[in-house]
Image (tube, rainbow, N blue to C red):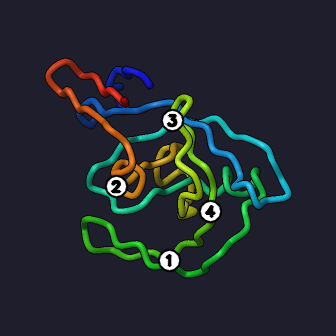
Amino acid sequence: MGVFDYQNIGDFPLAPIIPVKITPPSWSEYQGEYLSEAFVDTGSDCTLVPLEILSALKLKVVANKVPITGVSGGTVNVSACYGNLWLGEKAILAVKMHGFPGDRIQHRVLIGRDVINQCCIEFDGINSKLTIK
């Protein structure tokens, strides 16, 4: 599906960032799409999506005040929606997406293990490349 270069994200180590497309699930009345970039984060249990993307696609909230706990132990409550996440031509259907303020994640999607575990991904940190098969 593709080979992607790690990118510089400021004062942090290079990171695997890939282009993604988000679409509403098949049962939605709205059928738009939203193109974005995404961090691939093996330390995250779930997928976080900026609220502006969920709003633009008119995704229906299925749960409010879902607690998300970060690595530092802090917890925030977010809303959850379902949407399709496209990695190139491969769609991961009906991903539970947790809405998050975009500025907290640099206005990018954060792909967690809920999606990663449905793919064959090779992290090549030595060569700063990520391959999705």
Question: Which type of secondary structure does the marked residue at label 4 adopt?
Answer: strand
Mark 2 and mark 4 in contact (Cβ < 8 Å)?
no
Q: Residues within 10 Å of mark 3 (few under 14, many from 20)?
A: some
| Residue found 72% across the figure and 61% down from its top | 59
Check disc 1 and give the amino acid type. Answer: Asn
Q: Is residue 86 left or right of residue 126?
A: right
In the image, is residue 88 above or below residue 99? Answer: above
Q: Which secondary structure, mark 2?
A: helix
Compute the Cα span from label 2 to label 1.
19 Å
- List the residue tagged with mark 1: 77
Which element is circle 3 on? strand
- Judge from the rendering whether residue 42 lies leftward or rightward of residue 80; answer left or right: left
Quadrant placement of the N terminus: top left
- Quarter-wise, where is residue 120 in the image? top left
Residue 88 rendering spot, x and y as whole percentages: 53, 29
Q: Secondary structure at mark 1?
A: strand
> Which one is in front, 56 or 94?
94
Q: Are marks 3 and 2 in contact (CB under 8 Å)?
A: no
Q: Residues within 10 Å of mark 1 (few under 14, many from 20)?
A: some
- Residue 103: image tag: none
Viewer-nearest residue: 82 or 91: 91
Mark 2 near mark 1, Cβ–Cβ under 8 Å? Answer: no
Disc sitting over residue 82 in the figure: 4
Q: Residues within 10 Å of mark 4 (few under 14, many from 20)?
A: many
